Amino acid sequence: MEFFKCTIGGEIYGTGMTEIERGVAERKGIKVQEVPTSINSVREKGFNFDDVRLMRGAWRNEPNPDACKEFFRCLAICHTVLPEGDESPEKIKYQAASPDEAALVLAAKHFGFFFYRLGFSNVSFESGKIYFSENSN
């Protein structure tokens, strides 16, 4: 699974098109055109999201930032993913029962909610920092 679209508080985010949307368009005879990616887009296996309204902390300027914050917080802590390796956003690896769970935890990281440790009775994550890597292209 790739995280490329979400709905928070009734607002749809992400410029990607789901397979269902693509199938409906094809059945209706509508030609599907790829949406060009913005400079704010981030690509990592499992995370293919592009929407300037949320990326790099821009969600704080949305009409309902508290709903965004709670959504990302839930992505960071409501799962069975196990972190492995270095506890840094650039180096950590996630072991997940499904690619779906891994994609959701990666999404949380890219929205500034970095899950890095699972204890016996607690989950550790950082929030408020924006993690992204610059392309050298």
Image: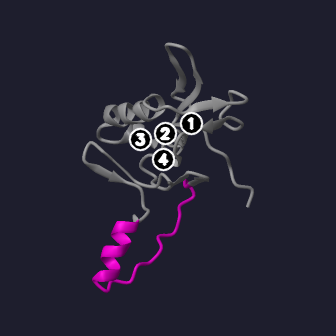
Mark 4, Cα crowd under 10 Å, few <14 / some 14-19 / many 20+, is: some
What label does residue 100 carry, if any? 4
Mark 1, Cα crowd under 10 Å, few <14 / some 14-19 / many 20+, is: some
Is the Cβ of the residue at disc 2 closer than 8 Å to that at disc 1? yes
Marks 1 and 3 sit apart, C-alpha to C-alpha, by 11 Å
Marks 2 and 1 sit apart, C-alpha to C-alpha, by 6 Å
Is the Cβ of the residue at disc 4 closer than 8 Å to that at disc 3? no
Tell which circle, 4 or 3, labels the residue nearer the N-terminal end.
3
- Residue type, numbered disc 3: Trp
Badge 3 is on which residue? Answer: 59
Whether 28 is among the magenta residues is yes
Front of the two marks 4 and 1: 4
Tell which circle, 4 or 1, labels the residue nearer the N-terminal end.
4
The magenta stretch is 19-41
Q: In which quarter of the image is residue 106?
A: top right
What secondary structure is marked by label 3? helix
Q: In which quarter of the image is the C terminus?
A: bottom right
What secondary structure is marked by label 4? helix
Badge 2 is on which residue? Answer: 57
Outermost residue toward the left in this view? 10
- Residue type, numbered disc 1: Ile
Is the Cβ of the residue at disc 4 closer than 8 Å to that at disc 1? no
Is the Cβ of the residue at disc 1 closer than 8 Å to that at disc 3? no
What label does residue 95 carry, if any? none
What secondary structure is marked by label 2? helix
Residue 4 at x, y percent in the picture: 46, 55
Marks 2 and 3 sit apart, C-alpha to C-alpha, by 5 Å
